[in-house]
Image (cartoon, grey):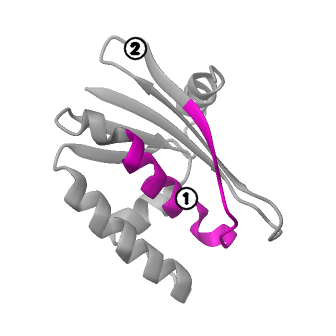
Amino acid sequence: MKKVYLSATPAYHEEEDMIFKYTIYDENEQFVQGDVIYHDYRKPAVTGLYSILELLKVLKTFRAEEIEIVVNDGALVEQIQGTTDTKNKDVIKVASFTRNKFNAFSTKIHIISVAGQYEQTKLWEEKLSHI
């Protein structure tokens, strides 16, 4: 099983890049891989969804294993699960596309949020600080 910690920082101006940070750990909590990815500007509301799409490209080599993605964004989890009640058309469109890619990727991939859980959020920050 691989545990992936993911952070997405939006760009608020068109000249800026979005920043995605991820770290991958194995079942023994040993660091496997991590990186920072810069991506062209997209609206801040869809940054998390684009981070999932970029992460799926990285995770292709681990497709056969069970993967748990840990984020600090409860809305992102709702968007991936299809339970969001947003009225933002951009979010709805990108969420649908991302959800289809996510579900087609593997049946062994899951996403959880640590938002609102102080101890888990500290661990999430610590794991991402290694890159």
Vertical side of 114 occupied by 24: above or below: above
Q: Which mark is residue 103?
A: none
- At mark 2, the secondary structure is loop
Q: What is the x, y in percent for residue 129?
A: 66, 24
Quarter of the image with the C terminus in it: top right
Question: How many marks can you see?
Answer: 2
Q: Disc 2 to disc 1, how far (Cα)?
A: 24 Å
- Magenta stretch: dominant SS? helix
Amino acid at the residue labelled 2: Glu
Instruction: Work out whether residue 89 or residue 112 is closer to the camera in this orientation and state it.
Output: 89
Vertical side of 3 occupied by 93: above or below: below
Query: Which residue is found at the position 60% from the left and 62% from the top?
Result: 47
Query: Which residue is found at the position 51% from the left and 81% from the top?
Result: 86
Mark 1 sits on what residue? Answer: 48
Q: Residue 35 appears in which quarter of the rendering?
A: top right
Q: What is the x, y in percent for residue 30?
A: 41, 11
Query: Which residue is found at the position 75% from the left and 61% from the top?
Result: 11
Vertical side of 75 occupied by 72: above or below: above
**Dot 2: within a 10 Å radius of its alpha carbon, few (fewer than 14), some, or many (20 or more) residues?**
few
- At mark 1, the secondary structure is helix
Amino acid at the residue labelled 1: Gly
Mark 2 sits on what residue? Answer: 29
Query: Which residue is found at the position 80% from the left and 71% from the top?
Result: 14
Instruction: Look at the image and give the residue range highlighted in magenta.
Output: 35-58
- Find out whether the residues at labels 2 and 1 contact each other: C-beta distance under 8 Å: no
Instruction: Work out whether residue 103 or residue 71 is closer to the camera in this orientation and state it.
Output: 103
Quarter of the image with the N terminus in it: top left
